[in-house]
Image: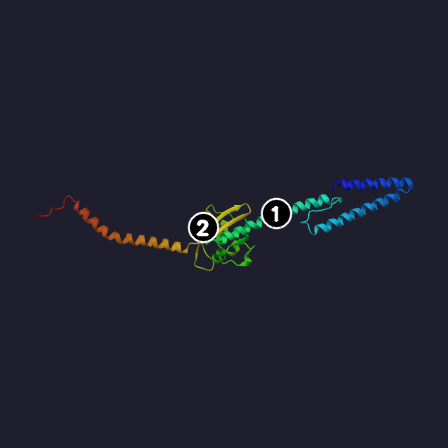
Amino acid sequence: MKFGAAQWLQLGALVIFVSIAGAISSAWGTAIAIAVTLWFLLQLRDTIRFRRWITRPLRRPDLADATWQPVAERVFRTYRANRRRTHTALNRLRQFRLATEALPDGAILIKPGGEIEMYNSAAQSLLGLTRGDIGSNLVSLVRNPSLTAMVDGMLLDRLIEIAAPHTQTQLEIRRIDVDDNQILILARDVTQLNRLLSMRQDFVANVSHELRTPLTVIRGYLESLEDPDLTPPQI
């Protein structure tokens, strides 16, 4: 611990006291013992003041003549910086929550290991999550090999389709890396879209089948007309 000006003055005063008292009384041992006791009492006073301040560290430390002043200043600056970072993170989390709650798609914020940090109402509905799932691992709640591979970063394609747990709903899952410590998983219900795609494919297949027969007949007539050996009609 570094001494400030006040502490050096205290130490110098004690040295002068020991020198004068020892020279006058020739009792150097007693003078040194008294000086050490005074120094110990001063340090005890400073320690008590520091402990009293640390219970409410939001106040700027007022320990100008205390040994603990440099330590208190560092603690105060560190605590204030951490408090600002916490408030910033909470504000960002609040903004993220407000934005994701307005989305029709499920949004789940997880850590690289898969632990859930937060999710919106749509994710709760689509994936069957509950309020107590915060901190749980997503891949243990939604058991799917493709989702596990996506969360683990084993898939080059960051878009998969899986069946929703406990329902017949088909979900499109997309992974977005927010930063090194957070991953955003988006879940979208594509059941109706897949049904429409299947209907379109069936419609195209049915139309192709229905048109194939008359087109074959027409093609046969056209090939007959192009036959050079065909006898021209008699008038």
List x then y, in percent, for residue 178. Answer: 52, 46
Residue at the (76%, 40%) spot, across then down: 5
Circle 2/circle 1 CB separation < 8 Å: no
Residue at the (19%, 47%) spot, across then down: 222
Horizontal side of 184 relative to 214 (left or right) equals right
Residue at the (75%, 49%) spot, across then down: 49
Answer few, some or many: residues within 10 Å of disc 1's Cα (few below 14, many 20 plus, some between 14 and 19): few
Which quadrant of the rendered structure holds the N terminus?
top right
Upstream in the sequence, badge 2 or badge 1? 1
- Coloring applied to the structure: rainbow
Horizontal side of 152 relative to 222 (left or right) equals right
Spot the residue most to the left: 235
Query: 33 or 144: which is nearer to us?
Result: 33
Residue 160 is labelled as 2
Q: Label 1 amino acid?
A: Arg
Spot the residue most to the bottom: 166
User: Considering the numbered disc 1 on the image, is that residue within a helix, a strand or a loop?
Assistant: helix
User: Considering the numbered disc 2 on the image, is that residue within a helix, a strand or a loop?
Assistant: strand
Indicate whether 160 appears above or below 18: below
Q: How many numbered circles does the render carry?
A: 2
Residue 63 is labelled as none
List x then y, in percent, for residue 137. Answer: 54, 54
List x then y, in percent, for residue 202. Answer: 33, 54
Horizontal side of 235 relative to 12 (left or right) equals left
Residue at numbered disc 1:
84
Answer few, some or many: residues within 10 Å of disc 2's Cα (few below 14, many 20 plus, some between 14 and 19): some
Q: Label 2 amino acid?
A: Ile
List x then y, in percent, for residue 30. Answer: 88, 45
How far apart in space, not on screen, are marks 2 and 1 (Cα)? Answer: 39 Å
Horizontal side of 213 relative to 120 (left or right) equals left
Which of label 2 and label 1 is nearer to you?
A: 1
